[in-house]
Amino acid sequence: WLHLFFYRSKKNLYSTFAKLSHFFSRLNLYCAILGAALLFFIATIICFEVTGRALGASSRLWVLETSEYSLLYITFLGTPYLLEKNMHVVIDIVYTSFTNAWRLIFQALNSVIGFLVCAVLAIVGVIVVVEQYGLGVREITVMRPYSWWLTAALPLGAGLMAIQFIEQFIRTLKGKAL
């Protein structure tokens, strides 16, 4: 009976992991789509700005500022998806020179370090966002947005990347090279 209990527990654990993995995969995809939409948006407003200025219209100050803020969100919305799909930058010459066992070791080490860095960034980011929200801090720019609107990109992206690094580590423990 004990063997049956542990078998079912292990099976439920894998099922739960698969469901969580699917949920975060979808969330990463939606964030990446939102990042792509923001990229399209800033490309469009910059084209209109350049065309307008060529035709003699005055410059719109909000275009540059909106583009800068959007670039921050594009980065933190798209990176977790790229990490999940293993489309991030890798030094192939070094990576392919290792045996499969060494690849798994370095992959596990990379996952642990990546998780720790992203977890710290997410935690500190949440603390900063909550503090900025409580103080009502605004940026000193033309649009004067609340600072937490901009800072919120960091804990969101870093938190999702930390989850991806956990998933990579679990895949590495199963012996699956990326």
Image (tube, helix red, strand yellow):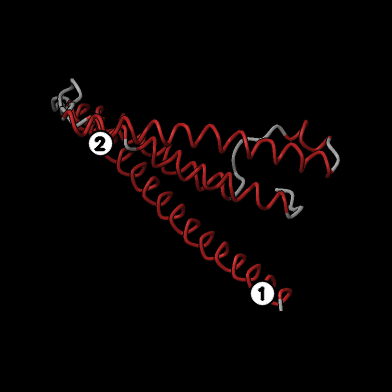
Name the residue tied to disc 1.
5
Of the two numbered discs 1 and 2 on the same chain, state the one appearing first in sequence: 1
Counting from the top left corner in percent of width and height, residue 96 is at 80, 38
Q: Amino acid at mark 1?
A: Phe
Q: Residues within 10 Å of mark 2 (few under 14, many from 20)?
A: some
Q: For the point 71% across and 74% down, which residue is it? A: 2
From what the image shows, is residue 46 above or below residue 27?
above
Residue 94 sits above or below residue 177 on the image: above
Q: Amino acid at mark 2?
A: Trp
> Where is the N terminus found, in terms of image quarters?
bottom right
Where disc 1 sits, the SS reads helix
Structural crowding at the residue carrying mark 1, measured as other residues with C-alpha within 10 Å and reported as few (<14), some (14–19) or many (≥20): few
Q: Residue at x 42, y 36 (%)?
A: 122
Residue 178 rendering spot, x and y as whole percentages: 70, 48
User: What mark, if any, has residue 149 been given in the picture?
Assistant: 2
Q: Report the residue that reaches farthest toward the right.
A: 99
- Residue 52, how many percent across, how many down? 19, 32
